[in-house]
């Protein structure tokens, strides 16, 4: 029965063209991120660069070279792994925090709801990028530079943590509204009658009913996380030794790529950010159209 429901959901999802475009786009970039080495070789450095200064695209370097002769295609493919990994982990943190706050706020109500919503309002009103811009340098100084945490250098770990801990407010609001609608349902009342704890009710009965909504909004959160990561890396909070697309844009700007006419250096990572963000938005909208009964009739 559950397998049939899943098949029906997937069938309705792919009735929308946006779902096909989003999935195809994201699959392509996820393959790049998963296996950059076999596709373009190891990440090029100043010591292994083989090109000339800001050389235009040719047969040997399809996307040209950077200011030290590194192949831009090599950098962009390796940057996909860093950018998507940062976005995915930051999104996971965001969804965990937002879902926890939203369920607790909607389920308990009263003072708990009031305090949690005031906290949510603060993060909702203050732009995530501005808050991240203020917090990130402080985190770097506290944690220390040059160290590795969970496989990431300090600057990248800080970017992940800051994005995840500052972008959860709208998720919390959505989950709270859904929890308010669910907590009065008969299956929740039956769980209380048989003696289930509040934690058990929230995790075993309410959370499963929220998963489709969490997935739909999660796709939009990833797009937002990519945008914030790109912006933070562009202003210098990224790591040149683990270059993301935002870091490549920053390096291109510092090298004067725009004034030198090296459009490929700026264009390649910029287009990747745009396409991946669009892919997640299309997939998120398709999921929302499929889940939301008021929008299911919309082609």
Image (cartoon, helix red, strand yellow):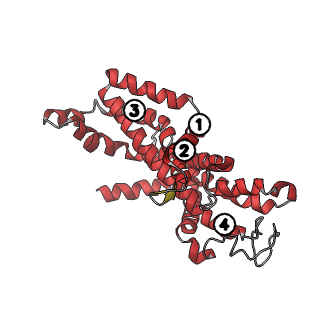
**For the residues carrying marks 2 and 3, which lies nearer the camera in this image?**
2
Mark 4–mark 3 distance (CA, rounded to whole Å): 42 Å
Q: Which mark is residue 176?
A: 3
Mark 4–mark 1 distance (CA, rounded to whole Å): 28 Å
SS at circle 3:
helix
> 106 or 160, which is in the foreground?
160
- Asked if the residue at tag 1 contacts the one at tag 4, i.e. Cβ–Cβ closer than 8 Å, the answer is no
Left or right of residue 117: residue 207: left
> 264 or 185, which is in the foreground?
264
| Residue drawn at x 71%, y 67% as measured from the top left | 72
Mark 3–mark 1 distance (CA, rounded to whole Å): 28 Å
Q: Which residue is mark 1?
A: 134
Mark before the other along the chain sequence, 4 or 3: 4
- Residue 38 can be seen in this image: yes
In this view, which residue lies farthest toward the left?
194
Q: Which residue is mark 2?
A: 141
């Amino acid at each position: 029965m559950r397998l049939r429901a899943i098949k029906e959901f997937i069938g309705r999802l792919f009735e929308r063209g946006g779902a096909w475009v989003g999935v195809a786009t994201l699959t392509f970039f996820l393959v790049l991120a998963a296996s950059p080495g076999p596709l373009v070789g190891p990440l090029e450095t100043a010591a292994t660069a083989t090109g000339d200064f800001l050389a235009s695209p040719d047969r040997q370097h399809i996307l040209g070279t950077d200011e030290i002769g590194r192949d831009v295609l090599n950098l962009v493919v390796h940057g996909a792994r860093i950018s998507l990994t940062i976005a995915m982990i930051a999104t996971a943190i965001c969804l965990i925090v937002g879902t926890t706050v939203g369920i607790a706020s909607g389920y308990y109500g009263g003072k708990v709801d009031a305090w949690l919503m005031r906290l949510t309002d603060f993060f909702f009103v203050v732009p995530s990028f501005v808050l991240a811009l203020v917090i990130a340098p402080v985190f770097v100084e506290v944690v220390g530079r040059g160290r590795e945490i969970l496989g990431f250098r300090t600057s990248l770990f800080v970017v992940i943590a800051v994005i995840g801990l500052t972008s959860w407010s709208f998720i919390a609001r959505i989950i709270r509204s859904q929890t308010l609608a669910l907590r009065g349902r008969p299956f929740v009342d039956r769980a209380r009658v048989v003696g289930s704890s509040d934690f058990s009710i929230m995790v075993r009965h309410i959370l499963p009913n929220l998963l489709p909504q969490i997935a739909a909004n999660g796709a939009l959160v990833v797009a937002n996380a990519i945008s914030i990561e790109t912006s933070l890396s562009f202003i210098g909070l990224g790591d040149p030794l683990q270059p993301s697309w935002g870091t490549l844009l920053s390096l291109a700007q510092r090298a004067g790529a725009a004034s030198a006419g090296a459009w490929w250096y700026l264009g390649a990572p910029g287009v990747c950010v745009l396409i991946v963000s669009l892919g997640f938005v299309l997939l998120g909208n398709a999921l929302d159209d499929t889940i939301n009964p008021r929008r299911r009739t919309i082609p």
